[in-house]
Amino acid sequence: MLNIYNNADALFEKLKNRMDNKFDEALQIAREIITDVKNNGDKAVKLYTSKFDGVELDDLLMSDDEINKIYAKCDKELIRIMEKAAQNIEEYHKIQVQNSSIITKDGIILGQRVLPLERAALYVPGGTAAYPSTVLMNAIPARLAGVRELIILTPPKADGIKPEIIAAAKICGIDKIFKVGGIQAVAAAAYGTESIEKVDKIVGPGNIYVAAAKKLVYGDVDIDMIAGPSEILIIADKQANPKYIAADLMSQAEHDILASSILLTDSHELAAQVNAELKSQIKNLSRSEIIKQSLEDYGGTVICQNINQAIELSNKIAPEHLELAVANPFEKLDLIKSAGSIFLGDYSPEPLGDYFAGTNHVLPTNGTARFSSPLGVDSFVKKSSFIYYSCEKLQEVSGDIIKFAESEQLTAHANSIKVREN
């Protein structure tokens, strides 16, 4: 089921071009809808909700009564599990909380203020699958950061919003839930409408149109990232368990036909065993057709000379999820330079991070792990510096500053210092 490559270049080229043409088309559509929402507010939002979701809305905001009725339908055991997961997520993210800082030295005060964003919008998909885990992963770091108001944007469906989404929102203390999704939701949050107040940041996954909309509004509002299709890369040696590897590869392939599942190994025998396991296990999975197409189009096994070469290739790909299915994985950890989240050993499969362990599952995709990081508390704060110099301290350094400014031919800068010289 996975094509086997002795050279990774052809596979890399496939991955690089996954989104190009479709994304250009999505950008064009998103641009038109965003303009309409900017000009016409709620009226445009309701129009597109009717067109794309088939739901006629009187109010975009969910009432407390609606929320409580849907919450009552949620499986109580699932609520208990989500509460436990929320505790793990909070415990992990607490270590990321930063405090303002200050340096004082003889007439000089320098400092950094760490301030929470005022308002953030969490986009929660409501299409073929609903993801309450996404609510937890986005909202808990935002709350720890001190964001004053958190809202959810989620598309309405004829049969209503999923109870598990509402339950996750209650666990996280979401302030408002709006029954709107798609490009129109992103535009409404970015620019404001009669019902939805403009936010400072929009986070959360969505389809290609949501991603395109987030790209277009960035700059007028902050976003978490331009998320591409999900990815998993597994580095495995000959001792690895092919049953586990096959299961983990499919755990990401089921997200989307554009998802990428890659195995890097130094063992031809393991590669064959994994393919056999894929064929066996896929028969029992509900999204088998999506998995099959994803594996065929964007999956692959690369046979490497050794595990160190596999790690070099992995760093080049910079995958969203990386599993180290090798003997003594901690010995290889320092060699990993680019990956969103790293899973070590046989008993740390990727879904452990998706749902429960506490690390964040909002991760950089499409190779952006080379220069970006998982979502966290820092994603919901802004920083500003402050400076105080006494008169005496400014006099001590004024000549240096004037010389520096004049070297750049910025005489007004230099003059700003000169007029303060005694």
Image (cartoon, rainbow, N blue to C red):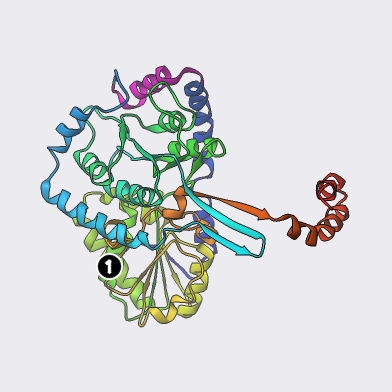
Residue 4: % across, % down: 42, 67
| Residue position for label 1 | 276
Determine whether, in the image, residue 136 is placed left or right of residue 192. Answer: left
Residue 216: % across, % down: 54, 36
Please tell me which residue is depicted at 47% across the width and 49% down the height of the picture. 381
**89 inside magenta stretch:** no
Determine whether, in the image, residue 422 is placed left or right of residue 330. Answer: right
Q: Is residue 243 above or below residue 136?
A: below
Image: magenta residue range? 39-55
Task: Count every numbered label the image shows and give the total.
Answer: 1
**44 inside magenta stretch:** yes
Residue 166: % across, % down: 23, 39
320 and 113: which is toward the camera: 113
Give, as a three-letter code, the residue at label 1: Ala
Q: SS for tag 1? A: helix
Q: Is residue 289 above or below residue 95?
A: above
Picture quarter with the N terminus = bottom left
* Main secondary structure of the magenta stretch: helix
Q: Is residue 60 above or below residue 13?
A: above
**Residue 154 in view here:** yes
Please tell me which residue is depicted at 74% across the width and 60% down the height of the picture. 393
Q: Is residue 25 above or below residue 361?
A: above
Residue 292: % across, % down: 32, 53
397 and 83: which is toward the camera: 397
Determine whether, in the image, residue 339 is placed left or right of residue 402. Answer: left
